[in-house]
Amino acid sequence: MTTSLHDKIAVVTGASRGIGRATALALARAGAHVVVTARNREELDTLAQEIEALGRRALVAAGDLSDTDQALGVAEAALATFERVDILVNNAGVGKFGTLDTLTIDDYDWMMNTNMRATFLATKAFLPGMIERREGWIAFVGSVAGLNGLPNETLYCASKHAQYGFARSLDHECRPHNVKVSYIAPGGVNSYFAFGTGRTQGDPKLETYLDNEDVADAVLFALQQPPKSRIFLVGLRPMGEQL
Ligand code: NAP
């Protein structure tokens, strides 16, 4: 028996493209109403129309989630419209690859603030309501880079390890309150990730990577577990990846 997501209220961060966009649509197909957030309002507006065409409600709440005021503004908008949030998908993330000598202090701030700080701010905003209602789901779109050290990925791995540690601790805190925590750890995904900062759009290698929908399916699989079951870690890799 799976758990129905019908009429649940979900927030998906980094929903303007890639994995977040696919996850928002998968949630809507499963019956959830979806708050879509990222910085690019135009892409979010298009996505919201697609969600509404599926018969679900959508709210566009644009903002830079690494910025405290903007993240709180997004949370306020979500709660003002839907009064509660049942599902948070912490997906927004960025990466820059290269040996450490090529990475800058600004790169550090960018990756840590987007991958970890935004996760912290969104989780802090929505968890209290879940605990109060004794029901909730917090999914992280983490990475294999959160579980392993990888060459040319010092800062990205550090930011994703931070997010993984946060999720593991949160899982302990949340379980007694009937709030489920899931960390999805994909290998390479054919999204828009790291274009210009380590990956090149059109590179044929991207075709061998997972599709955004594969990761969305894994998120939904974790969220739809029966009431007694919780899936903390989902590792998924492209067939062609060595890791
Ligand atoms: P993507 O296509 O580049 O999408 C990233 C999303 O994050 C976009 O919607 C972007 O929207 C949003 N975002 C970036 N900075 C933001 C900020 N400051 N505030 C709010 N939103 C922000 O990449 P993706 O592959 O779908 O990435 C999603 C997640 O998957 C990330 O956490 C990434 O670490 C993880 N992941 C990716 C891969 C991969 O190979 N692609 C593998 C494993 C894990 P705006 O630019 O509109 O703000």
Image (tube, helix red, strand yellow):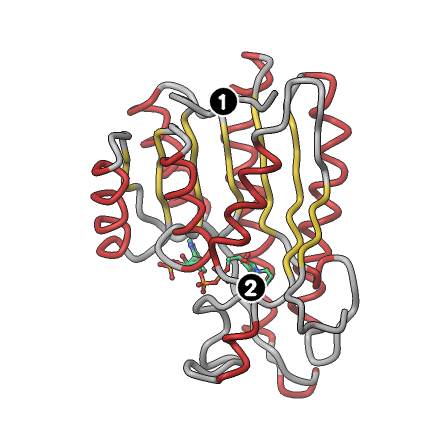
Q: Residues within 10 Å of mark 1 (few under 14, many from 20)?
A: some
Tell me the kind of residue under disc 2.
Leu
Q: Quadrant of residue 160?
A: bottom right
Image: 188 above or below 67: below
**Apparent side of residue 170 relative to residue 12 in the rendered image (left or right):** right
Residue at point 41%, 51% (across, down): 22
Give the mark nearer the N terminus: 1 vs 2: 1
Q: Quadrant of the N terminus?
A: top right
Residue 112 rendering spot, x and y as whole percentages? 60, 60
Q: Which residue is mark 2?
A: 210
Left or right? Give the position of 168 relative to 114.
right
Q: Secondary structure at mark 1?
A: loop
Where residue 133 appears, x then y in whole percent?
54, 12
38 vs 118, nearest the viewer: 38
Crowding near pointer 2: few (<14 within 10 Å), some, many (20+)?
many
Mark 2 CB near ligand 1 (8 Å cut): yes
Image spot of residue 66 (x, y percent): 48, 52
Where's the C terminus, which quadrant?
bottom right
Residue furthest to the top: 133
Which of the 4 quarters of the picture holds residue 174?
A: top right
- At horizontal 55% and vertical 52% (from top left) the residue drawn is 215
Q: Nearer the viewer, residue 242 or 38?
A: 242
Residue 114 versus residue 148: which sits nearer the camera?
Answer: 148
Residue drawn at point x = 46 percent, y = 45 percent? 68
Q: Amino acid at mark 1?
A: Ser
**Label of residue 4 in the image:** 1
